[in-house]
Structure formats: structure tokens, C-alpha cells
């Protein structure tokens, strides 16, 4: 069954209402979470926060309460003395054989707990094997934990062919369960409770338990046929080209006319390519002058950023690097002999900024900076 114009309008209205509500939430700061910026997927920072909670001597004032709950959640059997144990991060082991992410030591009881924290980082060669050897040589009782988002096993690359004794734990089950218990026990300490709630929100996001766009996804699921058409690759290509030509190209042409520049976007599109090259990286557009051998060129760099600089308009590499211009951040390379800058690659935010003129302003401001320096320094390019 086909989708009528009314179906499309109704769908877009629902999405628009959700976005408007989201805007109000943002204005009130309802989604503010300090961990989004300071921690997110940085393993060392996650380790530091977890270790801080586990440390009986830390400023949270809960003494060994959090540590006890953690040991109960993971089913630890070392029976370390939680009141006197010391907690470390990046704990160095013998002979520079590595650093343990989170290390809990009961010196008097000659017991220890080591936690290797892996969110997205790859396993290191015989990492768990080295940690197990260190623990075995220095402690009478110990436990080695391998912490990941979903509780997966370590690779043979980390364990060696004969795996050491270790236990898998996860953010999804163990850390979330532990943090929830910590929240329950922190009702009399509002600052700690709020921090734990925000950290829990981050864990939910990292483990897929919380979707920031859940309402939009729900509307999309109920309009699956329409969404499939909108998300169709060909429609996406046409949409991107339409936004560029409707809201950006004309403004860039006017800018070039005003500044005695030639605008050239003949390399913007390749057959079966979306925009700025999904398969090719030499697509973009030029700002040229007839007397120049080189032009100001914007092109795609590995689908991550757009490189912007002065480069050849006839193709090929520029083997002779020049002095970097002050208007550029990065030093000269084979493509850009005077240095270059990086601009955000095309994405959904970019298309919004194309429509409201923000992206045109970003680009033309950069071009103006280059033109001013060329003129000031009397550079003949």
C-alpha cells in the first residue's frame, strides 16, 4: 500500500512534535549529564570513577559500603578485609609487564583483586596471562576479573593458549546492578546519589539499555514502510544533492561573484556516490582565480572530515611544500603545500546548517581568511 501525502505529513508532524519536546527538555537542562563529556567511553576515566567508589578512604564518605556491595554483586570469594584494603588505578606490575586498570589490595591478608576494564579497546598480548602470573607470585589469595560491556570472554591473544583463572563481569549486569544498589544506599547523601544516577544513565546508554531517540524510533517503527522509502539509498543521495543545490550552492556562487572568484563544483558528484564521495575521496569544490595555478579546495578526507586548503586545480601531488600560512592549522602536505584546515564532514547536522546558512558562513569565512593573508603577505600562488 502506497503512502499518501497525508501519511507523510502526519509522520513528519509526529517527529516534529517529539523534537520540539526534546528542545524544551534541553533548554531546561533535563538531559545534562557531566559524565557524557568527562567520561563517556574513556576506559581510564571509567576505571577512575569505579575505583573511587570502591575505595573506603575516598571522599564519598560511605567507607567500605560500596566495596562490600561490589564484591557481593560479582560473587567474590577472596574475603579481603574491606575496611583496610587499598584501591589503585593503573597499578604497575613487575618488570614493566603492564598496568592493572583497577587493583584492590589487602596487604595484611596477602590478598588482591585485579580488574581489567575493556569497553571498546582491543586485548593486549598475553595481558590476562601476565596479570595472573603477577598475582600468583605475590599473593596467597587473589581474583582476576575481565570487565566488558556485555561480559564476553577474553581472546586467546590475551589469555594465551592455557587460559588463567579469571571471571568475566559486565557493565550490563554487574556494574549496573552494583550502581543501582549504591543509589539505594545513598538516599541520605543527595550529591552522591545524583552523581550515581547520572553515571547509571551513561552505562544504560553504553550498553543499549537506554535510547535517547526511543520516541522517534517508536514512531519510525509504526511507519516502517514510509521510513524504508525515506532511508532508501537513492532517496538519500537525491536528498543530499537537493539540500546542497537548494540552500548552499547559490550562496557560494554569489560569494564568489562578489570576491572575483570562480566557483567550480564539477567534482561534487560521481555516479552512485552520495555526496562528497562515499567511495572516492577526491570530491569537493574549488574557489579559483584565473591567474592562479592553484585554487582553494574543499575535499573529503577518509569520510571523517573535509580538508580545506590551497591545492592544485589540475590534479596531481604538490611535491614542493611551501611555508604554512597562519590561517591554516595543519602543516603542509603533498595535497596542500601551504597547510590546511579541517571542517566537519557532511552529516544530518550539516544539512540543517546548510539550510539555515551556517555552513556557508563557516566556509566563506575560511576563504576570506585565506584571501586576506594572501593579499597581506603579497603571496603569488
Image (cartoon, grey):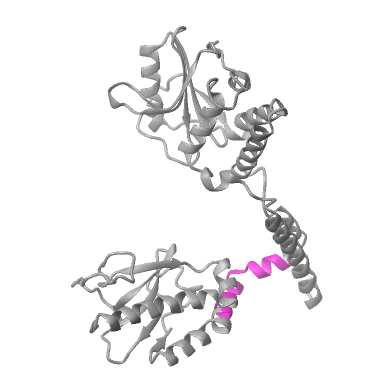
Q: How many marks?
A: 0
Q: Position of residue 97 (x, y in %)?
A: 31, 26
Q: In terms of depth relative to the viewer, which is nearer, 83 or 141?
A: 83
- Say left or right for 278 vs 225: left
Q: Pick the residue in front: 125 or 31.
A: 31
| Residue at 26% across, 72% down | 338
Q: Quadrant of the C terminus?
A: bottom left
The relative height of residue 366 versus residue 28 in the rendered view (above or below) is below
Say left or right for 286 vs 95. Answer: right
Residue 240 part of the magenta-drawn span:
yes
Is the residue 265 above or below the residue 351 in the image? below
Most extreme residue toward the left, as rendered?
320
Q: Quadrant of residue 124?
A: top left
Nearer to us in this view, 350 or 156 = 350
Q: Quadrant of the N terminus?
A: bottom right
The x and y percentages for residue 173 are 63, 31
Q: Residue at x 43, y 11 (%)?
A: 107
Residue extent of the magenta highlight: 226-243
Q: Quadrant of residue 171?
A: top right
**Residue at 59% from the left image edge and 19% from the top image edge:** 63
| Magenta stretch: helix, strand or loop mostly | helix
In percent of width and height, residue 106 lies at 47, 12
Residue 77 % position (x, y): 56, 13
Can the viewer see residue 238 in this picture? no
Q: Is residue 34 left or right of residue 24?
A: left
In the rendered structure, the answer to whether residue 71 lies left or right of residue 363 reads right
Q: Residue at x 54, y 30 (%)?
A: 50
- Answer above or below: position of 289 versus 33: below
Magenta highlight on residue 231: yes
Could you tell me if residue 198 is visible in this image?
A: yes
Amino acid at each position: 500500500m502506497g503512502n499518501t501525502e497525508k501519511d507523510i505529513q502526519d509522520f513528519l508532524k509526529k517527529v516534529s512534535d517529539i523534537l520540539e519536546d526534546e528542545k524544551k527538555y534541553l533548554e531546561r537542562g533535563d538531559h545534562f549529564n557531566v559524565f557524557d563529556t568527562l567520561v563517556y567511553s574513556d576506559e581510564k576515566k571509567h576505571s577512575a570513577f569505579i575505583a573511587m567508589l570502591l575505595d573506603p578512604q575516598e571522599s564519598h564518605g560511605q567507607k567500605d559500603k560500596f566495596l562490600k556491595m561490589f564484591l557481593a554483586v560479582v560473587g567474590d570469594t577472596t574475603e579481603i578485609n574491606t575496611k583496610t584494603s587499598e584501591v589503585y588505578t593503573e597499578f604497575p606490575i613487575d618488570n614493566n609487564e603492564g598496568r592493572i586498570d583497577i587493583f584492590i589490595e589487602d596487604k595484611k591478608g596477602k590478598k588482591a583483586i585485579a580488574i581489567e576494564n575493556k569497553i571498546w579497546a582491543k586485548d593486549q598480548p598475553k595481558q590476562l596471562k601476565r596479570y595472573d602470573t603477577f598475582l600468583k607470585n605475590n599473593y596467597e589469595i587473589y581474583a582476576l576479573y575481565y570487565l566488558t560491556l556485555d561480559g564476553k570472554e577474553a581472546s586467546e591473544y590475551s589469555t594465551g593458549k592455557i587460559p588463567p583463572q579469571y571471571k568475566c563481569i559486565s557493565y550490563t549486569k554487574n556494574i549496573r546492578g552494583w550502581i543501582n544498589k549504591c543509589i539505594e544506599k545513598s538516599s541520605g547523601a543527595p550529591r552522591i546519589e545524583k552523581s550515581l544516577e547520572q553515571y547509571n544513565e551513561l552505562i544504560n546508554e553504553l550498553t543499549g539499555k537506554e535510547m535517547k531517540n526511543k520516541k522517534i524510533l517508536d514512531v519510525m517503527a509504526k511507519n516502517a514502510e514510509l521510513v524504508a522509502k525515506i532511508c532508501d539509498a537513492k532517496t538519500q543521495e537525491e536528498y543530499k544533492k537537493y539540500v546542497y543545490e537548494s540552500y548552499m550552492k547559490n550562496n557560494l556562487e554569489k560569494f564568489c561573484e562578489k570576491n572575483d572568484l570562480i566557483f567550480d563544483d564539477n567534482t561534487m558528484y560521481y555516479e552512485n556516490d552520495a555526496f562528497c564521495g562515499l567511495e572516492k575521496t577526491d570530491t569537493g569544490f574549488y574557489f579559483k582565480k584565473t591567474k592562479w595555478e592553484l585554487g582553494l579546495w574543499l575535499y573529503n578526507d577518509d569520510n571523517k572530515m573535509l580538508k580545506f586548503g590551497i591545492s592544485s586545480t589540475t590534479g596531481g601531488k604538490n611535491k614542493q611544500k611551501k611555508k604554512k600560512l597562519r590561517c591554516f592549522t595543519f602543516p603542509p602536505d603533498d595535497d596542500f603545500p601551504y597547510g590546511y584546515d579541517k571542517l566537519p564532514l557532511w552529516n544530518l547536522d550539516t544539512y540543517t546548517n546548510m539550510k539555515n546558512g551556517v555552513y556557508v558562513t563557516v566556509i566563506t569565512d575560511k576563504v576570506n581568511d585565506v584571501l586576506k593573508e594572501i593579499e597581506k603577505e603579497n603571496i603569488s600562488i
